[in-house]
Image: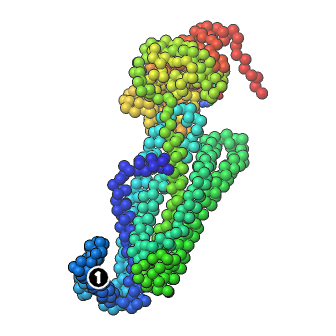
């Protein structure tokens, strides 16, 4: 619950809406009580043939008698006081008697004023009165309906807006999360958290501010009315309620566990869909649809099982609350019937009322109990919603509130404008414990140098450049930019000086132009066109009917891999960074275009430090220096000429075609 409290706290920014909904719920509660109270005149009219006037006459008569009796009591006490009786409680009793007498007089004058006011205004026949009561009931129900609509809208506003705020907050947290955590968590669980879990929290808030305020208020109105008839009888009737509460509490523990597992199940189904759809061509080419269907069936089935378990627990809540309700009603009926039939005021030695209850009063009491049981049943229904919301908020907050390790330190060092060097000092790095990927890397790259990092797959080339962008921090050793440790810098500020083009550039849904300016939204048109010329984007854009306004589709899927790489390259060039990282950045660009790109890049790369991760010999032409990595270690550091002479001395052997 403490985590759900955080969500509640967040929702308090809409406190005025909450207040309006609570006031509205209060009105609904009163109207509910009022509409049920109409049972009383109904019973009096139908069973006793009374009208409001005759009822008032009776009440006036009864109150008069009471006032007279209290008056006589007071007179007697006065007499005792005058005769000097030695009762030390006399003054207090006299005080009490006077108060009672005064109250009875007040009630009497209220009834008399009411009678004279109502005299000409209300029907005088029983049927006319009944008509009026029913008309009143309908009017109250209409008003209650309007309030319900308003209440639902207000509550939905709070819940939906809070959900939106949570989405914003947690999405921000997701964007600031450590790369490693994003990778190990995976997209599907993150999506489940951000959509499904927040949905559950929102539903919880809806129930909290809606049903769980409205229904108890409705209950409260009936409880007060029942209390006024006999609070002792009400207490006896509600004896079974704590047993029901205990049972439901016990159920909630199981619900929490099931709900948590259900969330895991949803993430797994989502993961399946995401994976299959993103690799749909591979699935098709190898005819693996049956396998994917089977995998999906498996995870969907286990989700279904988990949901069934949840539904089972869910289904238990209502019978329990209904059973408790019926037991309460049965106790009330038996106790009430005993009192009315035997005209008793005591039950098992306990005083229930001052004078024997009438059948019609008992009927109203039962109506009040029914009025309590309906909201109680609805409260039972929201129980699982609240449990799920609590579980969902726990997962959300515990996941997103973990601080990122790669963040700006409190006393972050200003990031120097790169003009000297990049230095790796005995850097060791592992993604997982005991699996060192980079081993004792010592490397200094002077400003302005173009370095190519080559080596076999998995030798750690990408990892090396990722460390430079501070996507990860090394476990051992340090990386320096112009003599300042990267760890001491704000990673966001550091990245302002770095441009990165990867082997598989992913574009965003939108136009080519929008993707080009992603790195610098306020770049001038001329700058964008210049970058696009260097990366040879304009060559293919000119042939497109919509030019730069062509939509690239989801993840840039409507363009070829080479075209995507060229757009990503132009985007990085537009950012005008001091450090350029090309991770197999031109691997999908055809040779002829690549040559053209190199010609224009050569000029651009002057006065910046560039690191190429590459396999292509053609890319090496741009490099001043070539670093060879093998199994996480630097095993060679050559100039371009040296490296080429080694290559020529032992030309690479290509595998024979099958
Ligand atoms: P290269 O770029 O030289 O092909 P990488 O730097 O991409 O190699 O990977 C080096 C090693 O690190 C590989 O064995 C790879 O399996 C592992 N690796 C890469 N990325 C991750 C990651 N996010 N989590 C765990 N292991 C990884």
Front-most of 466 and 365?
A: 365
In this picture the colour scheme is: rainbow
Of residues 15 and 86, the one drawn nearer to the viewer in this rendering: 86
Q: Secondary structure at mark 1?
A: helix
Residue at (46% x, 14% y) in the render:
483
- Please tell me which residue is depicted at 53% across the width and 12% down the height of the picture: 444
Q: Which residue is mark 1?
A: 73
Q: Quadrant of the C terminus?
A: top right
Rendering coords of residue 51 (x, y %): 34, 89
Q: Quadrant of ligand 1?
A: top right
Image coordinates for residue 622, horizontal then vertical, percent: 54, 15
Q: Is residue 452 visible?
A: no
- Residue 185 visible? The answer is yes
Residue at x 74% of width, y 22% of height: 655
Look at the picture and state if 288 lies above or below 603: below
* 609 left or right of 302 in image: left
- 411 up-or-down from 223: above or below: above
Q: Is residue 488 above or below residue 184?
A: above
Q: Residue 439, relative to residue 557: is it above or below?
A: above
10 Å neighbourhood of mark 1: few (<14), some, or many (≥20)? some
Question: 603 or 191, which is in the foreground?
Answer: 191
- The quadrant in which residue 395 appears is top right
Residue 265: x and y in percent read 62, 49
Percent of width and height locating residue 126: 36, 90
Q: In the visual, does 640 lie left or right of 233?
A: right
Q: Is residue 469 left or right of residue 259?
A: left
């Amino acid at each position: 619950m403490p985590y759900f409290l955080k969500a509640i706290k967040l929702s308090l920014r809409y406190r005025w809406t909450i207040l309006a909904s609570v006031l509205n719920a209060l009105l609904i509660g009163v109207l509910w009580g009022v509409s049920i109270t109409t049972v009383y005149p109904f019973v009096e009219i139908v069973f006793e043939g009374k009208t409001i006037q005759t009822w008032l006459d009776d009440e006036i008569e009864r109150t008069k008698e009471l006032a007279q009796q209290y008056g006589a009591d007071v007179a007697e006490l006065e007499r005792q006081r005058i005769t000097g009786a030695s009762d030390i409680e006399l003054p207090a009793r006299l005080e009490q008697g006077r108060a009672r007498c005064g109250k009875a007089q007040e009630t009497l004058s209220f009834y008399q004023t009411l009678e004279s006011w109502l005299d000409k205004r209300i029907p005088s026949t029983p049927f006319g009165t009944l008509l009026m009561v029913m008309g009143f009931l309908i009017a109250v129900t209409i008003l209650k309906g309007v309030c319900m609509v308003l209440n639902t809208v207000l509550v939905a506003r709070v819940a939906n807006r809070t959900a939106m705020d949570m989405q914003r907050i947690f999405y921000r947290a997701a964007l600031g999360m450590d790369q490693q955590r994003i990778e190990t968590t995976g997209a599907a669980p993150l999506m489940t958290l951000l959509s499904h879990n927040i949905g559950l929290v929102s539903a919880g808030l809806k129930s909290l501010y809606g049903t769980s305020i409205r229904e108890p208020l409705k209950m409260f109105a009936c409880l007060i009315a029942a209390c006024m008839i006999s609070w002792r009888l009400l207490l006896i009737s509600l004896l079974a309620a704590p047993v029901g509460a205990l049972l439901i509490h016990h159920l909630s523990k199981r619900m929490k566990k099931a709900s948590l597992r259900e969330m895991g199940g949803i993430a797994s189904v989502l993961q399946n869909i995401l994976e299959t759809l993103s690799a749909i061509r591979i699935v098709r080419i190898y005819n693996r649809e049956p396998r994917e269907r089977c995998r999906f069936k498996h995870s969907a089935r286990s989700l279904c099982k988990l949901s069934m378990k949840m539904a089972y627990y869910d289904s238990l809540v209502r019978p329990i609350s209904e059973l408790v309700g019926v037991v309460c009603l049965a106790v009330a009926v038996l106790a009430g019937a005993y009192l009315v039939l035997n005209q008793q005021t005591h039950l098992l030695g306990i005083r229930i009322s001052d004078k024997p209850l009438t059948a019609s009063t008992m009927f109203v009491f039962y109506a009040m109990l029914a009025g309590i049981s309906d909201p109680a049943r609805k409260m039972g229904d929201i129980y699982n919603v609240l449990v799920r919301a609590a579980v969902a908020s726990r997962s959300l907050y515990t996941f997103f509130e973990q601080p990122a390790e790669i963040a700006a330190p409190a006393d972050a060092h200003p990031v120097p404008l790169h003009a000297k060097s990049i230095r790796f000092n005995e850097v060791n790095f592992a993604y997982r414990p005991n699996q060192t990927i980079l081993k004792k890397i010592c490397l200094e790259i002077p400003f302005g140098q173009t370095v190519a990092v080559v080596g076999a797959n998995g030798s750690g080339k990408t990892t090396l450049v990722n460390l430079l962008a501070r996507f990860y921090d090394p476990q051992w050793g340090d990386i320096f930019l112009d003599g300042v440790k990267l760890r001491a810098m704000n990673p966001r500020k550091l990245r302002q000086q770095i441009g990165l083009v990867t082997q598989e550039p992913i574009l965003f849904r939108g136009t080519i132009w929008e993707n080009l300016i992603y790195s610098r939204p306020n770049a001038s048109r001329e700058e964008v066109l210049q970058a696009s010329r260097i990366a040879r984007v304009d060559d293919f854009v000119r042939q497109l009917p919509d030019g730069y306004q062509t939509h690239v589709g989801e993840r840039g899927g409507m363009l070829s891999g080479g075209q995507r790489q060229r757009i990503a390259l132009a985007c990085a060039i537009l950012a005008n960074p001091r450090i350029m990282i090309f991770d197999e950045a031109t691997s999908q660009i055809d040779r002829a275009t690549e040559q053209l790109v190199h010609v224009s890049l050569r000029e651009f790369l002057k006065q910046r430090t560039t690191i190429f991760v590459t396999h292509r010999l053609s890319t090496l032409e741009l490099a001043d220096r070539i670093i060879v990595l093998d199994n996480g270690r630097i095993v060679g550091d050559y100039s371009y000429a040296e490296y080429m002479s080694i290559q020529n001395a032992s030309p690479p052997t290509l595998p024979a075609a099958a």
